Each structure stands twice: as C-alpha cells, then as structure tokens.
Amino acid sequence: MKKRSHRITLILFLILLNLTLLWGCLAIEEVRLDRADFYKATLSEIDRLAPPRPETASQPIFLAGAAKIPLPLSPGLPMAGYGKRVGTAKGMHDLLFARALALRQGEERVIVISVDLLAVTDEMRGAVLRKIRTKIPFPARGLMIAATHTHSGPGALSSGFLEQFAAGPFDRSYFEKITDTLAEAALLAAGAMKPARIRHGAASAPDLIRNRMKSSGPVDPEVRFVEMLGEEGETIATLVNFSAHATVLKPDNLHFSGDYPGFLEAAIEEQGGVALFTAGSVADQTAHPPEGSDRYEQARAMGRELARRVGESPRMTPQETRGLSVQTLSIHLPPARVKMKSGKRLASFLSSPFFDAETIVQTIRIGPVLLIGIPGDISVVLGEEMKASARARGMEAMIVGFANDYIGYLLPRDLYLTPAYEARMSFHGPQMGEYLVEVVARLIDRIDAPPFSEEVSSEAAGREVSK
C-alpha cells in the first residue's frame, strides 16, 4: 500500500511539473481587500459570532489544571522540519511532550495544548476534539492546539500532498497514537482543575534573536508569560511565548529533541507546574543562541537563559481573574498564489487543489492576556500590529503561531514580493498579511476591555506567593 501511495504521489508530481512549464508564468494580481469575495465572506462570519458575555460585578470562580504526557517515539520515524535532511530518526536526545492547560470560568471552557511538533493540521485538531468529546462534553471553539515548531520532531502526521514532501509519508496508525496522546493530556488537565488566579509579565531577550530576512530588520525580543497559581501560591502552569524559530539544531541532527523550547519548558518546570511554550511571530525571526560545545549545548543554554529571565522578571497580579473568553473563526482564504519566480505564479486551477479554502483564527482571553492563534509562520511586523490592536483594548497579546492548522508563511506585502524562501512559502498572495491583521483586529474589537481592579506589584505578589 505504501509503495502504491508513493507511486501515485510521484505521478501527480510529474503531472504538476509538466503543467507548470505551460502555466507557470502568470502575473500575481492584486485586488482591493474591501472588494474581495473572501474578505466579504469572512466579515459575514464575524458578524455571526456569538456576542461576548457581558461582564458582571461578581464573576464565577476561575479554575485551572495542567498535565503533560511524553509523545510516542521510536527510531525509524521520519523527522519533520528540513527538506534537505537525509535519513530517518536514529533515536532520542530529549523527551518530547504534549502539554495541556485546561481553564474554566462559569460556562466558558478552554483547553490549550502545546505539543513538540513542527506544525499542527486542522485534521489533527479535529481528531483530538472528537477524542476529547468521547469522554467529556466540550465546545469545539474552546480547543487550541499549537506546535512548538521544533525542527527535530516526528513527521508522518499529515495526509496533505505537499506536507508529505517535508515531513514524510502519512502514517495513519502513528497519527492515531499522537492524537490519542494529545487528547489524554487534555483530559488529564481538565480533571485536575482547581481554583486559581493568574500572574503575568514579560522578559526581554534581544541578544537571543535576529531577523533572518533582513540583517538590520526588526525583531520581537519579548518573552511574554502568564502563570496560573493555586490557592496556596503553587504554580499550576506557565504559558510562555517567544518569537524565534526552533532551529538551533540543524538538518544533520537525527535525534528527536524539543530544541531550545524543550529546554526552556524543562527549566521552568524545575520551579513547579507545567510549562507550555508557544511560538510567536517567527516567520522572519531566528534563534541566536549562546556559544556551546555543540548544537545541543547551544539549545540547552538558550532555553535555560530564557527561563532565567522569565524567573527574574516582574510580575503583575490582578486582584481578580475576570474575563475568560474564546472566539474561534473559520476564515475564507484568498485563492492560492504559488510563486514560481518573483512576480509570477502558478495558475490557480493547478495550485488550488493542494491548498485549503478556509482556515482557523482564534482568540483566547485570560484576564488581561490575549492569546491570538495564527495558523502558520507570521512575520514580526504583522504580529506587532496585532499586539498593538490588543494593547489598544487594554490587553497584552501573545501571538501563538502554528495554532490549529498550517497554511504557510504570512508576510506583509513588501516581503511577499521578494524572491526569498519565506516569500515562496507564502501561498495566498500579497494581501494575505493585511487581511489577517484586519480579521484579528475585528475579533479583538468584539472583546470587552477587561475592567480589572488595581494590580499588585511584582514585589507584593512575590511576598504573597512566598506565604
């Protein structure tokens, strides 16, 4: 069966290659966003979203629970992340995990899963949701699954034609094992929920990141985090977000590893609780690790240094945790625009069959912190525009890339029009970045600004926890 699948894939590729020679030189046209059918259709979807629940003086108790489970791994599995990697996995350098955070306030329920994989597909999210629902009632909109984007994790997890070139042939039985693991972590976290409150803050790491598309281009040095604390001050979970590609380990690595995010999570967990890493605006951002004897030592040093800065950063503690809410939107995508060379594209009738017509965008508000789930590699400029929209409504945002689906690179127009690798991996035209920023801004506008009581300073919060 696998040989037949490979033969069909090869035949399809050869057909596509031949058609490309005939239809690969069309111009990349642009249409005003407000006149585009996909934009109008998505605005209609936003209008149909349920309105946010109104704030009341007395909010239901805030609950949080967390869990983590190692991923099933074995030598011989394909590895995902580098097209020029040769060979399958030889073994494991460090454990990979599915980490889950379950939250509840009143009728609102949320589960966030961070998993040590290159990316997540909508097929994977759908499978995990179905498996969760065999055990507990749970709203479809409340689930976020985000990959840490390690380039040293397993492949074979997508049935998509193009994805199999980058991550190996799809293995249905392994897909079921992985989605079983993610669902189990989610259920354990949901079963561990208890009264909680939050602290949040941000560290800075400009020396550990650089722009890989422009040597003097912008970076996002922020290491934003939010902690869930139990009634005795114990740490239940820490969500942490940083915008550098997890590519400290290179294509010659044939051992499974979480790269620097895995070492970051492990270091934070030494202080208690479960740490969930989420990748931020990484499209044009790459890691700049400290020196080390080898790549593993560099990844470890970078992860532990980020954890140290998080640990030493000021915290803010709202007097009350109010306003858990989630919005999950299926958005219509622009027609596929696969670039063959700068300024030219493949005909849509050849490219569209390989790309989805819709994807998922999500916002999860946890008190003053807003998670913005983006299904791909998003550039730092677009991420900063989204953060500014949240800040204007009184919230601090984490851009959660590789969330719920994967549609490629998401760039502003000027970067899309370059011949760079990232631009060739941007599949939906020069307006996709502008479109996504507008959609997220409209979702944020639907969220009531959080009416928080005065926040406790980091020193006061530290005294309170130490008690």
Image (cartoon, rainbow, N blue to C red):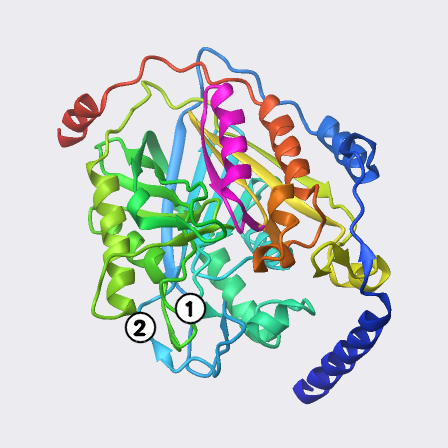
Nearer-the-camera pick, 401 or 99: 401
Residue 374, given in percent of the width and then of the height, sits at 57, 44
The residue most toward the top is 57
> Is the residue 379 above or below the residue 78 in the image?
above
Residue 203 part of the magenta-drawn span:
no
Residue drawn at point x = 29 percent, y = 61 percent: 299
Measure how far apart labels 1 and 2 are at the Cα level: 10 Å
- Measuring from the top left, give residue 261's x and y in whole percent: 35, 55
Which residue sits at x=75%, y=30%? 43
The reply to whether residue 272 is visible in this rendering is: no
| Whether residue 451 is situated above or below residue 433 in the rendered picture | above
Q: Residue furthest bottom?
A: 3
Q: Amino acid at mark 2?
A: His
Quarter of the image for the C terminus: give it: top left
Residue 93 tag number = 2
Horizontal side of residue 162 vs 384, given as left or right: right
Residue bounds of the magenta highlight? 376-403
Residue 152's label in the rendered image is 1
Element marked by disc 1: loop
